[in-house]
Amino acid sequence: MDFNPELNEDQLQIQQWVHDFASEVVRPAAADWDEREETPWPIIKEAAEIGLYSWEFMAEAMMNDPTGLTMPVALEELFWGDAGIGLSIMGSGLAAAGIAASGTPEQVMEWVPQCYGTPEDLMLGAFASSEPDAGSDVAAIRTRAVYEESTDEWVINGTKTWITNGGIADVHVVVAVVDPELGSRGHASFVIPPGNSGLSQGQKFKKHGIRASHTAEVVLTECRIPGNCVLGGKDKLEERLARVREGKSGNAQAAMQTFESTRPAVGAQAVGIARAAYEYSLEYAKERRQFGRPIIQNQSIAFMLADMAMEIDAARALVWRGAWLGKHKKYRNAEGSMAKLKAGRVAVWATERAIQILGGYGYVRDYPVERWHRDAKIYDIFEGTEQIQQLVISRAISGMRIE
Ligand SMILES: Cc1cc2nc3c(=O)[nH]c(=O)nc-3n(C[C@H](O)[C@H](O)[C@H](O)COP(=O)(O)OP(=O)(O)OC[C@H]3O[C@@H](n4cnc5c(N)ncnc54)[C@H](O)[C@@H]3O)c2cc1C
Protein backbone atom coordinates (compact mmCIF):
# COMPACT_ATOMS: atom_id res chain seq x y z
CA MET A 1 0.00 0.00 0.00
CA ASP A 2 1.37 3.42 -0.97
CA PHE A 3 1.22 6.45 1.30
CA ASN A 4 -1.93 8.38 0.45
CA PRO A 5 -2.82 11.54 2.38
CA GLU A 6 -6.43 11.39 1.22
CA LEU A 7 -8.61 10.29 4.14
CA ASN A 8 -11.13 7.52 3.49
CA GLU A 9 -14.86 7.75 4.33
CA ASP A 10 -14.45 6.17 7.78
CA GLN A 11 -11.62 8.52 8.66
CA LEU A 12 -13.56 11.58 7.51
CA GLN A 13 -16.48 10.49 9.70
CA ILE A 14 -14.25 9.95 12.73
CA GLN A 15 -12.62 13.33 12.12
CA GLN A 16 -16.02 15.06 12.09
CA TRP A 17 -17.29 13.08 15.10
CA VAL A 18 -14.27 13.97 17.26
CA HIS A 19 -14.32 17.55 16.02
CA ASP A 20 -17.97 17.96 17.04
CA PHE A 21 -17.20 16.59 20.52
CA ALA A 22 -14.13 18.85 20.80
CA SER A 23 -16.01 21.97 19.75
CA GLU A 24 -19.28 21.35 21.61
CA VAL A 25 -18.04 19.73 24.83
CA VAL A 26 -14.27 20.08 25.26
CA ARG A 27 -13.45 23.62 24.21
CA PRO A 28 -16.26 25.35 26.13
CA ALA A 29 -15.06 23.63 29.32
CA ALA A 30 -11.32 24.14 28.77
CA ALA A 31 -10.68 27.41 30.65
CA ASP A 32 -12.60 26.20 33.70
CA TRP A 33 -10.70 22.91 34.05
CA ASP A 34 -7.41 24.67 33.41
CA GLU A 35 -8.12 26.96 36.39
CA ARG A 36 -9.36 24.12 38.59
CA GLU A 37 -6.35 21.91 37.80
CA GLU A 38 -8.49 18.83 38.37
CA THR A 39 -9.29 15.72 36.36
CA PRO A 40 -12.39 16.58 34.29
CA TRP A 41 -14.44 13.51 35.24
CA PRO A 42 -17.73 14.77 33.75
CA ILE A 43 -16.06 15.27 30.36
CA ILE A 44 -14.35 11.87 30.48
CA LYS A 45 -17.78 10.43 31.23
CA GLU A 46 -19.30 12.19 28.21
CA ALA A 47 -16.44 10.89 26.09
CA ALA A 48 -17.16 7.39 27.41
CA GLU A 49 -20.87 7.73 26.68
CA ILE A 50 -20.21 8.46 23.00
CA GLY A 51 -17.56 5.69 22.85
CA LEU A 52 -14.53 7.95 22.44
CA TYR A 53 -13.16 7.04 25.88
CA SER A 54 -13.18 3.27 25.40
CA TRP A 55 -10.78 0.47 24.64
CA GLU A 56 -12.99 -0.47 21.69
CA PHE A 57 -12.32 2.88 20.01
CA MET A 58 -8.59 2.59 20.65
CA ALA A 59 -8.51 -0.96 19.28
CA GLU A 60 -10.59 -0.02 16.22
CA ALA A 61 -8.50 3.07 15.47
CA MET A 62 -5.18 1.27 15.98
CA MET A 63 -5.81 -2.18 14.56
CA ASN A 64 -8.44 -1.86 11.83
CA ASP A 65 -6.65 0.94 10.03
CA PRO A 66 -4.11 -0.12 7.42
CA THR A 67 -3.10 3.52 6.80
CA GLY A 68 -2.10 4.47 10.37
CA LEU A 69 -3.80 7.85 9.91
CA THR A 70 -7.00 7.37 11.92
CA MET A 71 -5.41 7.93 15.33
CA PRO A 72 -3.47 11.09 14.40
CA VAL A 73 -6.57 12.51 12.73
CA ALA A 74 -8.71 11.87 15.85
CA LEU A 75 -6.03 13.21 18.20
CA GLU A 76 -5.55 16.43 16.24
CA GLU A 77 -9.25 17.19 16.54
CA LEU A 78 -9.51 16.35 20.25
CA PHE A 79 -6.44 18.38 21.18
CA TRP A 80 -7.68 21.24 18.99
CA GLY A 81 -10.48 21.32 21.58
CA ASP A 82 -8.12 21.32 24.56
CA ALA A 83 -4.87 19.56 25.37
CA GLY A 84 -5.36 19.20 29.15
CA ILE A 85 -8.77 17.60 28.73
CA GLY A 86 -7.51 15.72 25.67
CA LEU A 87 -4.76 14.14 27.74
CA SER A 88 -7.24 13.25 30.49
CA ILE A 89 -9.19 11.35 27.86
CA MET A 90 -6.18 9.83 26.11
CA GLY A 91 -3.86 9.28 29.11
CA SER A 92 -5.22 5.79 29.74
CA GLY A 93 -4.07 4.97 26.22
CA LEU A 94 -0.44 5.13 27.43
CA ALA A 95 -1.10 2.23 29.80
CA ALA A 96 -3.17 0.37 27.20
CA ALA A 97 -0.39 0.79 24.63
CA GLY A 98 2.19 -0.46 27.16
CA ILE A 99 0.09 -3.56 27.82
CA ALA A 100 -0.55 -4.13 24.11
CA ALA A 101 3.16 -3.73 23.29
CA SER A 102 4.51 -6.22 25.85
CA GLY A 103 1.58 -8.30 27.11
CA THR A 104 0.34 -11.73 26.10
CA PRO A 105 -3.08 -11.84 24.35
CA GLU A 106 -4.62 -12.99 27.67
CA GLN A 107 -3.06 -10.06 29.54
CA VAL A 108 -4.29 -7.63 26.88
CA MET A 109 -7.84 -9.01 27.18
CA GLU A 110 -7.74 -8.87 30.97
CA TRP A 111 -6.13 -5.49 31.61
CA VAL A 112 -6.80 -3.14 28.68
CA PRO A 113 -10.59 -2.97 29.32
CA GLN A 114 -9.79 -2.17 32.97
CA CYS A 115 -7.85 0.91 31.84
CA TYR A 116 -11.19 2.34 30.67
CA GLY A 117 -14.10 0.76 32.58
CA THR A 118 -17.58 1.74 31.40
CA PRO A 119 -19.50 5.04 31.28
CA GLU A 120 -21.18 4.01 34.57
CA ASP A 121 -17.93 2.90 36.19
CA LEU A 122 -15.05 4.87 34.67
CA MET A 123 -11.55 3.51 35.17
CA LEU A 124 -8.17 5.02 34.31
CA GLY A 125 -4.78 3.69 33.29
CA ALA A 126 -1.30 5.11 33.92
CA PHE A 127 2.10 4.26 32.45
CA ALA A 128 4.95 4.79 34.90
CA SER A 129 8.50 4.77 33.61
CA SER A 130 10.09 8.09 34.67
CA GLU A 131 11.79 8.47 38.03
CA PRO A 132 13.36 11.43 39.84
CA ASP A 133 16.84 10.40 38.58
CA ALA A 134 15.75 8.61 35.40
CA GLY A 135 13.98 10.83 32.86
CA SER A 136 15.70 10.81 29.47
CA ASP A 137 18.17 8.31 30.89
CA VAL A 138 15.81 5.35 31.08
CA ALA A 139 18.66 2.96 31.88
CA ALA A 140 19.03 4.71 35.26
CA ILE A 141 15.66 3.40 36.53
CA ARG A 142 16.02 2.12 40.10
CA THR A 143 12.54 0.79 40.92
CA ARG A 144 13.21 -2.84 41.68
CA ALA A 145 11.01 -5.89 41.12
CA VAL A 146 12.03 -9.09 42.91
CA TYR A 147 10.32 -12.43 42.32
CA GLU A 148 9.37 -14.38 45.45
CA GLU A 149 9.19 -18.06 44.62
CA SER A 150 7.36 -19.13 47.80
CA THR A 151 4.33 -16.89 47.21
CA ASP A 152 4.58 -16.62 43.39
CA GLU A 153 4.56 -12.85 43.77
CA TRP A 154 6.62 -9.92 42.55
CA VAL A 155 7.60 -7.41 45.21
CA ILE A 156 8.16 -3.91 43.84
CA ASN A 157 9.80 -0.95 45.55
CA GLY A 158 10.59 2.49 44.15
CA THR A 159 9.29 5.94 43.27
CA LYS A 160 7.98 7.03 39.88
CA THR A 161 7.50 10.68 39.01
CA TRP A 162 5.63 12.87 36.49
CA ILE A 163 3.07 10.14 35.95
CA THR A 164 -0.05 11.06 33.98
CA ASN A 165 -3.01 9.71 36.02
CA GLY A 166 -0.45 8.52 38.60
CA GLY A 167 -2.08 7.35 41.83
CA ILE A 168 -5.64 8.00 40.61
CA ALA A 169 -5.48 5.30 37.93
CA ASP A 170 -7.04 1.88 38.46
CA VAL A 171 -4.40 0.06 36.41
CA HIS A 172 -0.75 1.18 36.62
CA VAL A 173 1.83 -0.21 34.23
CA VAL A 174 5.20 0.12 35.95
CA VAL A 175 8.65 -0.34 34.44
CA ALA A 176 11.09 -1.86 36.95
CA VAL A 177 14.53 -3.44 37.13
CA VAL A 178 14.60 -7.23 37.36
CA ASP A 179 18.33 -7.65 36.69
CA PRO A 180 20.44 -4.61 37.67
CA GLU A 181 23.50 -6.00 35.83
CA LEU A 182 21.83 -5.64 32.42
CA GLY A 183 21.02 -1.89 32.32
CA SER A 184 17.85 -1.10 30.34
CA ARG A 185 17.82 -4.68 29.00
CA GLY A 186 17.26 -5.89 32.55
CA HIS A 187 13.93 -4.01 32.80
CA ALA A 188 10.43 -5.46 32.64
CA SER A 189 6.91 -3.99 32.70
CA PHE A 190 4.36 -4.97 35.32
CA VAL A 191 0.65 -4.44 35.76
CA ILE A 192 -0.31 -3.26 39.23
CA PRO A 193 -3.97 -4.31 39.56
CA PRO A 194 -6.57 -1.92 41.01
CA GLY A 195 -6.69 -1.35 44.75
CA ASN A 196 -3.17 -2.52 45.59
CA SER A 197 -2.23 -1.16 49.03
CA GLY A 198 1.49 -1.11 48.16
CA LEU A 199 0.93 1.66 45.60
CA SER A 200 0.17 5.23 46.66
CA GLN A 201 0.15 8.69 45.16
CA GLY A 202 2.94 11.04 46.20
CA GLN A 203 3.08 14.71 45.31
CA LYS A 204 0.59 16.00 42.74
CA PHE A 205 2.32 18.56 40.52
CA LYS A 206 1.02 22.07 39.80
CA LYS A 207 1.90 22.65 36.18
CA HIS A 208 2.58 25.37 33.61
CA GLY A 209 0.09 23.88 31.12
CA ILE A 210 -2.15 20.86 30.40
CA ARG A 211 -3.45 21.55 33.88
CA ALA A 212 -6.62 19.49 33.57
CA SER A 213 -4.41 16.43 33.22
CA HIS A 214 -3.37 14.87 36.54
CA THR A 215 0.40 14.43 36.97
CA ALA A 216 1.81 12.94 40.18
CA GLU A 217 4.42 10.78 41.84
CA VAL A 218 3.66 7.11 42.34
CA VAL A 219 5.22 5.45 45.38
CA LEU A 220 5.63 1.67 45.47
CA THR A 221 6.35 0.25 48.92
CA GLU A 222 6.57 -3.53 49.26
CA CYS A 223 4.01 -3.57 46.46
CA ARG A 224 3.07 -7.25 46.00
CA ILE A 225 1.48 -8.43 42.78
CA PRO A 226 0.72 -11.91 41.42
CA GLY A 227 3.51 -13.64 39.49
CA ASN A 228 1.50 -13.48 36.27
CA CYS A 229 1.43 -9.66 36.32
CA VAL A 230 4.76 -9.35 34.51
CA LEU A 231 3.88 -8.35 30.95
CA GLY A 232 4.73 -11.02 28.44
CA GLY A 233 4.85 -13.70 31.15
CA LYS A 234 7.65 -14.96 33.37
CA ASP A 235 8.92 -17.63 30.96
CA LYS A 236 9.35 -15.14 28.13
CA LEU A 237 11.11 -12.75 30.51
CA GLU A 238 13.54 -15.48 31.62
CA GLU A 239 14.25 -16.40 27.98
CA ARG A 240 14.89 -12.76 27.07
CA LEU A 241 17.19 -12.18 30.06
CA ALA A 242 19.10 -15.38 29.25
CA ARG A 243 19.63 -14.18 25.65
CA VAL A 244 20.92 -10.80 26.86
CA ARG A 245 23.26 -12.47 29.37
CA GLU A 246 24.70 -14.55 26.53
CA GLY A 247 25.45 -11.31 24.70
CA LYS A 248 22.66 -11.66 22.15
CA SER A 249 21.09 -8.30 21.65
CA GLY A 250 17.46 -9.28 22.22
CA ASN A 251 15.05 -7.54 19.91
CA ALA A 252 16.46 -4.02 19.80
CA GLN A 253 15.23 -3.34 16.25
CA ALA A 254 11.63 -4.25 17.13
CA ALA A 255 11.74 -2.18 20.33
CA MET A 256 13.05 0.79 18.35
CA GLN A 257 10.18 0.47 15.83
CA THR A 258 7.68 0.37 18.72
CA PHE A 259 9.03 3.54 20.34
CA GLU A 260 9.19 5.31 17.00
CA SER A 261 5.65 4.35 16.07
CA THR A 262 4.10 5.99 19.18
CA ARG A 263 5.68 9.37 18.47
CA PRO A 264 3.57 10.58 15.51
CA ALA A 265 0.45 10.29 17.69
CA VAL A 266 2.04 12.66 20.22
CA GLY A 267 2.97 14.98 17.35
CA ALA A 268 -0.66 14.96 16.19
CA GLN A 269 -1.73 16.32 19.57
CA ALA A 270 0.73 19.21 19.18
CA VAL A 271 -0.58 19.91 15.66
CA GLY A 272 -4.08 20.19 17.16
CA ILE A 273 -2.94 22.89 19.60
CA ALA A 274 -1.04 24.78 16.87
CA ARG A 275 -4.07 24.71 14.55
CA ALA A 276 -6.34 26.02 17.30
CA ALA A 277 -4.02 28.99 17.82
CA TYR A 278 -3.62 29.63 14.09
CA GLU A 279 -7.36 29.56 13.35
CA TYR A 280 -8.13 31.82 16.31
CA SER A 281 -5.48 34.39 15.47
CA LEU A 282 -6.44 34.40 11.77
CA GLU A 283 -10.03 35.32 12.63
CA TYR A 284 -8.86 37.84 15.21
CA ALA A 285 -6.53 39.52 12.71
CA LYS A 286 -9.39 39.94 10.25
CA GLU A 287 -11.63 41.54 12.91
CA ARG A 288 -9.23 43.66 14.95
CA ARG A 289 -8.81 47.15 13.52
CA GLN A 290 -5.95 49.54 14.22
CA PHE A 291 -4.99 52.60 12.17
CA GLY A 292 -8.37 52.32 10.44
CA ARG A 293 -7.89 48.86 8.90
CA PRO A 294 -7.91 45.21 9.98
CA ILE A 295 -4.48 44.31 11.37
CA ILE A 296 -4.20 41.44 8.84
CA GLN A 297 -3.78 44.08 6.13
CA ASN A 298 -0.31 44.69 7.52
CA GLN A 299 2.08 42.33 5.79
CA SER A 300 3.92 41.67 9.05
CA ILE A 301 0.74 40.13 10.51
CA ALA A 302 -0.42 38.45 7.28
CA PHE A 303 3.01 36.89 6.67
CA MET A 304 3.11 35.56 10.23
CA LEU A 305 -0.18 33.82 9.54
CA ALA A 306 1.08 32.53 6.19
CA ASP A 307 4.10 31.03 7.92
CA MET A 308 1.89 29.51 10.62
CA ALA A 309 -0.34 27.87 7.99
CA MET A 310 2.71 26.46 6.19
CA GLU A 311 4.47 25.19 9.32
CA ILE A 312 1.34 23.49 10.63
CA ASP A 313 0.81 21.75 7.29
CA ALA A 314 4.48 20.70 7.28
CA ALA A 315 4.17 19.29 10.81
CA ARG A 316 0.98 17.41 9.93
CA ALA A 317 2.62 15.99 6.79
CA LEU A 318 5.50 14.63 8.88
CA VAL A 319 3.05 13.24 11.46
CA TRP A 320 0.99 11.43 8.82
CA ARG A 321 4.11 10.13 7.08
CA GLY A 322 5.49 8.96 10.43
CA ALA A 323 2.22 7.23 11.28
CA TRP A 324 2.07 5.49 7.90
CA LEU A 325 5.71 4.34 8.08
CA GLY A 326 5.11 3.09 11.63
CA LYS A 327 2.10 1.08 10.54
CA HIS A 328 4.15 -0.54 7.78
CA LYS A 329 7.30 -0.94 9.90
CA LYS A 330 9.31 1.07 7.40
CA TYR A 331 11.24 3.55 9.52
CA ARG A 332 14.71 4.28 8.20
CA ASN A 333 15.73 7.69 9.54
CA ALA A 334 13.71 7.92 12.77
CA GLU A 335 10.79 9.52 10.95
CA GLY A 336 8.59 9.01 14.03
CA SER A 337 10.96 11.17 16.07
CA MET A 338 11.13 13.73 13.25
CA ALA A 339 7.34 14.04 13.35
CA LYS A 340 7.19 14.55 17.10
CA LEU A 341 10.13 16.97 17.16
CA LYS A 342 8.76 19.14 14.36
CA ALA A 343 5.20 19.17 15.70
CA GLY A 344 6.30 20.13 19.22
CA ARG A 345 8.42 23.00 17.94
CA VAL A 346 5.68 24.22 15.63
CA ALA A 347 3.13 24.17 18.45
CA VAL A 348 5.36 26.23 20.75
CA TRP A 349 6.25 28.68 17.96
CA ALA A 350 2.74 29.04 16.49
CA THR A 351 1.09 29.59 19.88
CA GLU A 352 3.69 32.25 20.72
CA ARG A 353 3.01 33.99 17.40
CA ALA A 354 -0.72 33.83 18.15
CA ILE A 355 -0.11 35.75 21.38
CA GLN A 356 1.81 38.33 19.33
CA ILE A 357 -1.08 38.70 16.90
CA LEU A 358 -3.55 39.28 19.71
CA GLY A 359 -1.23 41.74 21.48
CA GLY A 360 -2.31 42.44 25.08
CA TYR A 361 -5.42 40.34 24.58
CA GLY A 362 -3.20 37.38 23.83
CA TYR A 363 -1.45 37.71 27.16
CA VAL A 364 -4.48 37.47 29.43
CA ARG A 365 -6.64 34.54 30.45
CA ASP A 366 -9.85 36.01 29.01
CA TYR A 367 -8.59 34.72 25.66
CA PRO A 368 -7.47 31.13 25.02
CA VAL A 369 -4.17 31.71 23.23
CA GLU A 370 -2.02 32.11 26.36
CA ARG A 371 -3.36 28.73 27.56
CA TRP A 372 -2.53 27.12 24.24
CA HIS A 373 1.02 28.46 24.55
CA ARG A 374 1.37 27.03 28.05
CA ASP A 375 -0.08 23.71 26.88
CA ALA A 376 2.17 23.50 23.82
CA LYS A 377 5.46 23.55 25.74
CA ILE A 378 5.02 20.05 27.15
CA TYR A 379 5.43 18.69 23.59
CA ASP A 380 9.12 19.68 23.72
CA ILE A 381 9.47 17.69 26.93
CA PHE A 382 7.43 14.53 27.45
CA GLU A 383 7.56 11.32 25.43
CA GLY A 384 11.20 12.15 24.70
CA THR A 385 12.56 15.70 24.91
CA GLU A 386 13.54 17.81 21.91
CA GLN A 387 17.19 16.86 22.45
CA ILE A 388 16.45 13.15 22.79
CA GLN A 389 14.54 13.21 19.47
CA GLN A 390 17.55 14.94 17.89
CA LEU A 391 19.79 12.25 19.35
CA VAL A 392 17.62 9.47 17.92
CA ILE A 393 17.48 11.13 14.49
CA SER A 394 21.20 11.91 14.36
CA ARG A 395 22.06 8.31 15.28
CA ALA A 396 19.65 7.00 12.63
CA ILE A 397 20.97 9.21 9.82
CA SER A 398 24.64 8.69 10.68
CA GLY A 399 24.62 5.11 11.90
CA MET A 400 27.10 6.33 14.49
CA ARG A 401 27.18 6.62 18.25
CA ILE A 402 26.39 10.29 18.92
CA GLU A 403 26.54 11.35 22.60
C1 LIG B 1 3.27 16.79 32.38
C2 LIG B 1 4.14 15.58 32.27
C3 LIG B 1 3.57 14.34 32.07
C4 LIG B 1 4.37 13.20 32.01
N1 LIG B 1 3.80 11.96 31.89
C5 LIG B 1 4.58 10.86 32.04
C6 LIG B 1 3.99 9.56 32.13
O1 LIG B 1 2.77 9.40 32.06
N2 LIG B 1 4.80 8.49 32.32
C7 LIG B 1 6.17 8.61 32.41
O2 LIG B 1 6.84 7.60 32.58
N3 LIG B 1 6.76 9.83 32.30
C8 LIG B 1 5.99 10.95 32.13
N4 LIG B 1 6.57 12.20 32.06
C9 LIG B 1 8.03 12.31 32.16
C10 LIG B 1 8.70 12.79 30.90
O3 LIG B 1 8.71 11.78 29.93
C11 LIG B 1 10.11 13.28 31.30
O4 LIG B 1 9.93 14.52 31.95
C12 LIG B 1 11.04 13.42 30.12
O5 LIG B 1 11.37 12.15 29.65
C13 LIG B 1 12.31 14.16 30.46
O6 LIG B 1 12.91 13.67 31.63
P1 LIG B 1 13.37 14.71 32.78
O7 LIG B 1 12.19 15.57 33.07
O8 LIG B 1 13.93 13.92 33.90
O9 LIG B 1 14.47 15.61 32.11
P2 LIG B 1 16.03 15.25 31.93
O10 LIG B 1 16.17 13.91 31.31
O11 LIG B 1 16.74 15.51 33.21
O12 LIG B 1 16.47 16.34 30.87
C14 LIG B 1 16.77 17.69 31.23
C15 LIG B 1 17.34 18.37 29.99
O13 LIG B 1 18.57 17.75 29.59
C16 LIG B 1 18.46 17.31 28.24
N5 LIG B 1 19.19 16.05 28.08
C17 LIG B 1 19.14 14.93 28.85
N6 LIG B 1 19.94 13.98 28.36
C18 LIG B 1 20.51 14.48 27.24
C19 LIG B 1 21.43 13.98 26.28
N7 LIG B 1 21.92 12.74 26.35
N8 LIG B 1 21.80 14.77 25.25
C20 LIG B 1 21.30 16.04 25.16
N9 LIG B 1 20.41 16.58 26.05
C21 LIG B 1 20.04 15.81 27.07
C22 LIG B 1 16.96 17.14 27.99
O14 LIG B 1 16.64 17.20 26.61
C23 LIG B 1 16.40 18.30 28.79
O15 LIG B 1 16.48 19.47 28.03
C24 LIG B 1 5.78 13.34 32.09
C25 LIG B 1 6.35 14.60 32.27
C26 LIG B 1 5.55 15.71 32.38
C27 LIG B 1 6.20 17.05 32.64
Image (tube, rainbow, N blue to C red):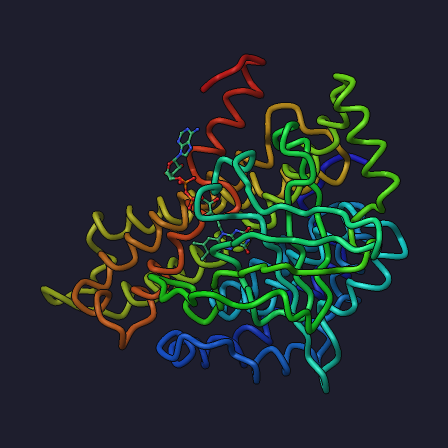
Please state the horizontal and vertical placement of residue 316, each as a whole percent of the image.
Answer: 54, 46
Q: Is residue 325 visible?
A: no
Numbered label tally: 0
Residue 311 vertical position relative to residue 163 in the rendered view, above or below: above
Q: Quadrant of residue 89?
A: bottom right
Say which quadrant the C terminus sits in: top left
Going 71% across and 42% down the picture, which residue do you hit? 188
Which quadrant would residue 243 be assigned to in this image? top right
Residue at 61% of width from left, 65% of height from top? 199
Ligand 1 is in which quadrant of the figure? top left
Residue 1: x %, y % from top left: 81, 36
Is 355 left, or right, of 102 in this rendering?
left
Which residue of the protein is positioned furthest toward the left in this rendering? 291
Question: Residue at 75% across / 40% down in the picture?
Answer: 327
Closest to the observer, 362 or 141: 141
Residue at horizontal 75 percent and vertical 33 percent from the top? 329
Answer left or right for 200 relative to 360: right
Residue ranking furthest to the front: 150
Name the spot of residue 366 as percent of width and height, x first. Answer: 27, 77
**Image height of 234 relative to 225, above or below:** above
- Judged left or right of residue 268, residue 366 is left
Q: Is residue 108 left or right of residue 221?
A: right
Quadrant of residue 220 in the image?
bottom right
- Residue 76 seen in the figure: yes
Residue 76, given in percent of the width and then of the height, sits at 56, 58
15, 259: nearer the viewer: 259
